[in-house]
Amino acid sequence: PSTRVARPLLHGYFRSSCSWRVRIAFALKGIDYDQVPVNLIKDGGQQLTDQYKELNPMQQVPAVTIDGVTLSQSLAIIQYIEETRPGPALLPADPQKRAKVRMICDLIASGIQPLQNLYVLQKIGEDKVSWAQHFIIRGFVALESLLKETAGKYCVGDEISMADICLAPQVYNAERFKVDVDQFPTIKRLNQTLLALEAFSTSHPSCQPDTPADLRA
Amino acid sequence: MAKPLLHGYFRSSCSWRVRIAFALKGIDYDQVPVNLIKDGGQQLTDQYKELNPMQQVPAVTIDGVTLSQSLAIIQYIEETRPGPALLPADPQKRAKVRMICDLIASGIQPLQNLYVLQKIGEDKVSWAQHFIIRGFVALESLLKETAGKYCVGDEISMADICLAPQVYNAERFKVDVDQFPTIKRLNQTLLALEAFSTSHPSCQPDTPADLRA
């Protein structure tokens, strides 16, 4: 009898941009996976349970159990998937293009998202919306400038990459905070291209197992 | 072939990560100091904006291209230069290294960098301490599982490159690192290495006299 390998298990939240990045990566690679929703609001935040802490001591989503190991940090997870699964490459072959992809990913994943995630906004309190808008706009001004140089059909040239995987969820966050993305034409154009792809639409926050009824597409 | 050129600041932990990587690989490079405080912050000039539109350090000009984001720079160096590997060969170990790097580079440092602390204002020290401690509690837990002589097993990696500069930041904000014994032990091991001591903030071209080792 053959050994059945368990499908990857994603602990995430429908609206978490970092969780969405991982969902996009699985979809691009054609990998079936299971989801365990972690509701960041309910019960004071299910990511704060001792049980979830075992999976990710940082008490954030996503966490993915795959090949017998549990990983956190969306970009580490995605690069693991890239290095262990075949299918469309999520990074270009050329080292300078790879560096540009990573630069864009890190601008988003270190320079924008952590400054507007739930934990930080809860600490900021009243001014949370203008705080989030500030950091998103600041990051998008820089990102627009970079993308004008690097983008072809996708963020870096004409091949989809981890940069695109990071971009669309960050634009979704921008829209949630009422940032006018029209002022960033390259970002806007790229995002429209991406949302039309199946991997981005099937993984979209509006149609996940834990999407609330009033937010379903 | 021109030497790589690092635009950085002596005390910027992200700049120090890149200096460590160059040192581990035995790569000579030039430095252009970008003083984050002087003149309202030299990273805010139009000139610097051309190098890095995010107006942060580090930025590195190498092989005819200018890159920003320290981990993107370091992985580029890793992929184009020989010498000790900065990432393990095994994909699961690589993932653990990246997980540790990202916990620091996305989960801690951006919440306590100069720009954010300037926006926080008066409460900046307790804000910085909060995020460093929160991150170190998680990191200590991870490292207890992954660490051997270094952060992941017994080979030095990008995780170590990220760790020492973050401990330096923790100490600057008077976080008691003794409460994190694995972090403390690893940091002591790393600071004894030449690549970490020659690149240390206390002995850079732009280190002020009163902070020189």
Image (cartoon, coloured by chain):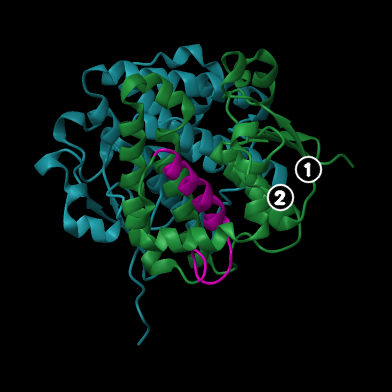
Chain colours: A cyan, B green
Q: Residue at x 20, y 43 (%)?
A: A210
| The magenta stretch spans residue A117 | no
Of the pair A122 and A201, the residue shown nearer to us: A122
Residue B161 against residue A20 in the figure, above or below: below
- Identify the element where label 2 is drawn: helix
The residue identified by callout 1 is B29
The residue drawn where x is 37% and y is 18% is: A133
Chain of residue at mark 2 = B
Subunit under mark 1: B
Name the amino acid type tagged 1.
Answer: Tyr
Q: Do we see residue A86 in this rendering?
A: no
Q: Circle 2 is placed at which residue position?
A: B22
Q: Amino acid at mark 2?
A: Phe
Q: Are marks 2 and 1 in contact (CB under 8 Å)?
A: yes
Give how far across and how far down residue A40 sits, in percent: 20, 41
Q: Hey, which quadrant is residue B84 in on the image?
A: bottom right
